[in-house]
């Protein structure tokens, strides 16, 4: 793509009201993410990682500061506009999988594409599920799959709409070490094949160290600014 950075964050602030006070969650956050790179946002629980991811993806709006995603300033869009941008250019992977329990593995991957009018949705879903090793589990429901298998379905779903950027929030947080390693390998392999920008939120430094660059947060502030510009 023509732009050098797929994500630019400038002077970002976010706070929430707590009783009569306001609690600062993020304070003066600045960083950029080059297109097609892998980037980790790391820090202890309560450091503001997930809040930052939500702001970067347009799931929430900051008190002040700007986020430019895929060449578009999110502040220039209303809620519907941000949702449209996400549906066209963004993929998500969550710690809790977030599969629809009444849909099979195949349907969980294909239905979002079908809702966008993609006539090849079923074939795309079958191909991706085969790539994550679930070609024989297409008609199984989430309750019939292990946690690792559910996250592999979520991986297939995330890449199905060919996103320009994929946000992964603690993608191995609910998995044991061996299963997490398998999911991590698949995530990075699919990402490399697709040429997607991968932005991971994690407290797992082994996972973070697999990324090209890192941003470290503590108490809502960037702990080591230089790690975000290497």
Image: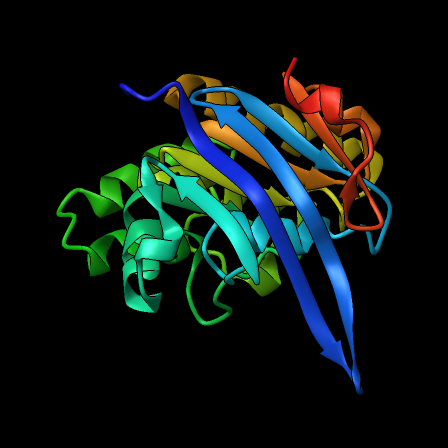
Q: Quadrant of residue 25?
A: bottom right
- Identify which residue is drawn at 27% across, 46% down: 88
Q: Nearer the viewer, residue 13 or 6?
A: 13
- Image coordinates for residue 177, horizontal then vertical, percent: 83, 35
Which image quarter is the N terminus in?
A: top left
The residue lying toward the viewer, choosing from 32 and 137, is 32
State whether residue 194 is above or below residue 156.
above
Measured as percent of width and height from the top left, residue 169 is found at: 64, 47
122 lies above or below 14: above
Residue at the extreme bottom of the image, as rendered:
19
The quadrant where residue 181 appears:
top right
In the picture, measured across the screen, residue 62 lies left or right of residue 222, that is left
> Left or right: 14 with respect to 34?
right
The residue drawn where x is 73% and y is 21% is 227
Q: Is residue 58 left or right of residue 70?
A: right
Q: In the image, residue 95 lies at what x, y percent?
A: 67, 52
Q: Compare residues 147 and 167 and report the one nearer the observer.
A: 167
- Would you place residue 67 above or below residue 190 in this image? below
- Answer whether residue 134 is visible to the viewer in this image: no
Q: Specify the quadrant that holds the C terminus.
A: top right
Residue 5 visible, this orientation: yes
Q: Residue at x 52, y 30 (%)?
A: 198
Given residues 135 and 209, the one toward you in this image is 209
Residue 4, x across and y down, in percent? 39, 18
Q: Residue furthest top?
A: 230
So how many labels did they put on this image? 0
Q: Give the colour scheme of this rendering.
A: rainbow
Is 193 placed left or right of 202 in the picture? left
- Residue sitting at x 42%, y 65%: 103
């Amino acid at each position: 793509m023509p732009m050098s950075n797929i994500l630019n964050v400038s002077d970002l602030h976010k706070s929430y009201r707590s009783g009569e006070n306001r609690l600062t969650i993020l304070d003066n956050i600045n960083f950029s993410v080059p297109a097609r790179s892998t980037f980790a946002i790391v820090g202890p629980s309560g450091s503001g990682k997930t809040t930052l991811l939500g702001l970067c993806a347009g799931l929430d709006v900051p008190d002040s500061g700007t986020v430019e995603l895929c060449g578009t300033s999110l502040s220039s869009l209303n809620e519907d506009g941000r949702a449209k941008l996400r549906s066209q250019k963004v993929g998500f992977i969550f710690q809790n999988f977030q599969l629809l329990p009444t849909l099979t593995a195949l349907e969980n991957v294909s239905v979002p594409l079908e809702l966008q009018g993609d006539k090849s949705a079923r074939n795309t879903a079958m191909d991706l599920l085969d790539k994550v090793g679930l070609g024989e589990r297409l008609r199984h429901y989430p309750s019939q799959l292990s946690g690792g298998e559910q996250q592999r379905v979520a991986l297939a779903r995330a890449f199905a709409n060919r996103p320009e950027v994929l946000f992964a929030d603690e993608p191995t947080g609910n998995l044991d070490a061996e299963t997490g390693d398998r999911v991590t390998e698949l995530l990075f392999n699919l990402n490399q094949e697709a040429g997607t920008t991968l932005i991971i939120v994690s407290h797992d430094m082994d996972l973070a160290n697999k990324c090209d660059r890192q941003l470290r947060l503590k108490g809502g502030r960037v702990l080591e600014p230089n790690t975000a510009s290497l």
